[in-house]
Image: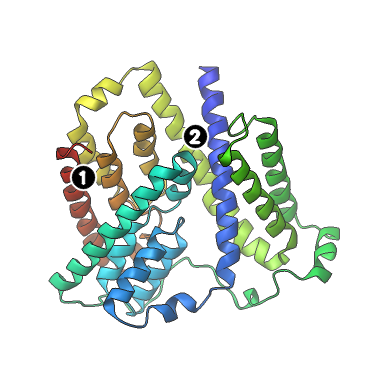
Amino acid sequence: MITLFEESFFIAVMITGFVFIMMLVIEYVNVFTEGLWQQSFRGSRMKQYLLAGLLGVTPGCLGAFTVVALYSHRVVGIGAVVTAMIATSGDEAFIMFSMMPKTAFYLSVILLLVGLVSGFLVDIILGMQANGSDVCAHEFEYHDEDECNCFNKSQIIVQWRHCSLPRGVLAGALFLFVLGLLSGQIGPSGWNWLKITILLLSGVGLFIISTVPDHFLEIHLWEHVAKKHIPRVFLWTFGALLLMHLLIDHLHLKEFLQQHQLGILIVASLVGVIPESGPHLIFLTLFTEKAIPFSILLASSIVQDGHGMLPLLADSRWDFVKIKAINVAVGLLVGMIGYTTGW
């Protein structure tokens, strides 16, 4: 039992570290693209679907938040939101790419295609109406101060002389993560492309933490990434891994799950309604353990959207229910097709 706990813990640390680094990079890049996303949506409906899908399929919640904000401002229609929410997997996308990169890529392509078709059909059926409210309620972090030089050489040494607590904690945690990778305690024991990639990304993460201004680091990297996302990612990942090991390795439920896959498909689709990053990891872990087929993972991925729909839930409960109902219908339909054809 101790070995099982330790194994799940270190795998969760590796996955959470990867997610943390990728979020740092996306937050950093996002500063230089503020304003470009909304301008890009001006144009044809097909362009809106494509851009919404690309934003949705981008790992994390920022793309989904952006589409919801544009919907709330009546810039895009409900079809674009459906496209984005089907395409997105929220924070779980980072985890999928760290656990099974090849499958995650194919899954992302399928989600994008299903989202594009679904968004187009929804707008045709509902008359291409943008039904969003007039109030924008999203979690996209941006401030006037972000229009700063994120690599000011004259300030880097000064910032380290007066090192803030967030900078010290983030740099220290990432440094320990790198040591764990180098020692083989975290991640692959041998040197392969995955280990080299994570180490290179860790170097980028250390560079970002070491050079960005205090405002950017404290508002974006500390408040938004480290305090909001990372604890949930670790707890859900660790909990899902531990639960699946217990169910499959100790309780020997793999055969039971394989004999009741149709019921699991329905449950996976309904669990996807929860506007939370985490529950989807149960089905992701079951898939990696070969306890469920790809079709169930696909159905779960279509319905769930991480935190992407939370802003819309606060803004318009009716729109939230409507879009979720559409996504559940699409998830069940595509999942059933895949299940009956032997995916």
Identify residue for label 1: 335
- The residue at the point 63 percent across, 57 percent down is 222
Q: Is residue 203 above or below residue 185?
A: below
SS of the residue under disc 1: helix
The x and y percentages for residue 52 are 35, 68
SS of the residue under disc 2: helix
- The image quadrant of residue 288 is top left
The x and y percentages for residue 11 are 54, 33
The x and y percentages for residue 147 are 64, 77
Is 9 left, or right, of 275 in this rendering?
right
Identify residue for label 2: 238
Is 165 left, or right, of 223 in this rendering?
right
Mark 2, Cα crowd under 10 Å, few <14 / some 14-19 / many 20+, is many
Q: Is residue 311 above or below residue 146?
A: above
- The image quadrant of residue 286 is top left
> What is the three-letter code of the residue carrying label 2?
Phe
Q: Earlier in the sequence, mark 2 or mark 1?
A: 2
The x and y percentages for residue 259 are 20, 25
Mark 1, Cα crowd under 10 Å, few <14 / some 14-19 / many 20+, is many
Taking depth in this image into account, of 108 and 259 the one nearest to the observer is 108
Q: CA distance from mark 2 to mark 1?
A: 27 Å
